[in-house]
Amino acid sequence: YAFAREAYPYDSKDSIIVRAIQRNISNLFSLQQERDYVINYMEKLAKAVNARALSIYLSIPGVARIAAVRLVAELGDLRRFSTSAQIDAFVGIDPGRYQSGEKDSSLGITKHGNHIARKILYRVITQMETVKA
């Protein structure tokens, strides 16, 4: 309320503007609680599904709890991949190639895989670059 009073010093506490700000702040707190509940629930599920992978992801500097949980959800059990190239292909970061009778070109990444996992990994890697532990 004090912040709202400073922001709108000419409005009374019963003003519609002050009441709208108070309602929005209350909604933000409620959404934050809902988000925390969902994240905790996702973490419990990730521990139940693959606690080992979750603990490995969390041990990496720059990987936050939410990112680790999301990686477990998107990648699942990493033991199903026998090589790192299979993980690359699953995520869609394997190199693309174009071959014809005359050309053999290397392209960028294929982007055929799991786009959500690819985005999570991109964010994790950029965060890891800033941590540099």
Image (cartoon, helix red, strand yellow):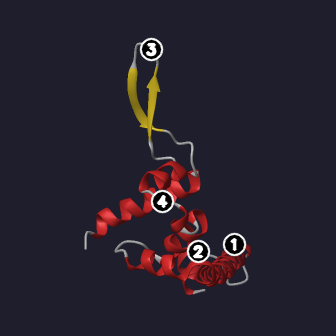
Location of residue 89 with respect to 41 vertically, above or below: above
Q: Secondary structure at mark 3?
A: loop
Mark 1, Cα crowd under 10 Å, few <14 / some 14-19 / many 20+, is: some
Q: Amino acid type of disc 3?
A: Gly
Seen from the viewer's position, the closer of residues 32 and 83 is 83
Seen from the viewer's position, the closer of residues 11 and 95 is 95
The residue that mark 4 highlights is 82
Mark 2, Cα crowd under 10 Å, few <14 / some 14-19 / many 20+, is: some
Mark 4, Cα crowd under 10 Å, few <14 / some 14-19 / many 20+, is: few
The residue that mark 1 highlights is 17
Q: CA distance from mark 1 to mark 2?
A: 8 Å
Task: Tell me, for residue 101, which label it has, or none.
Answer: 3
Name which of mark 1 and mark 2 comes first in the sequence. 2
Quadrant that contains the N terminus: bottom right
- Contact (Cβ within 8 Å) of mark 1 with mark 2: yes
**Residue occupying image coordinates x 50% and y 39%:** 110
Name the residue at the top extreme: 102
Name which of mark 3 and mark 2 comes first in the sequence. 2
- Coordinates of residue 84 in the picture (x, y in percent): 42, 56
Name the residue at the front extreme: 82
The residue that mark 2 highlights is 8
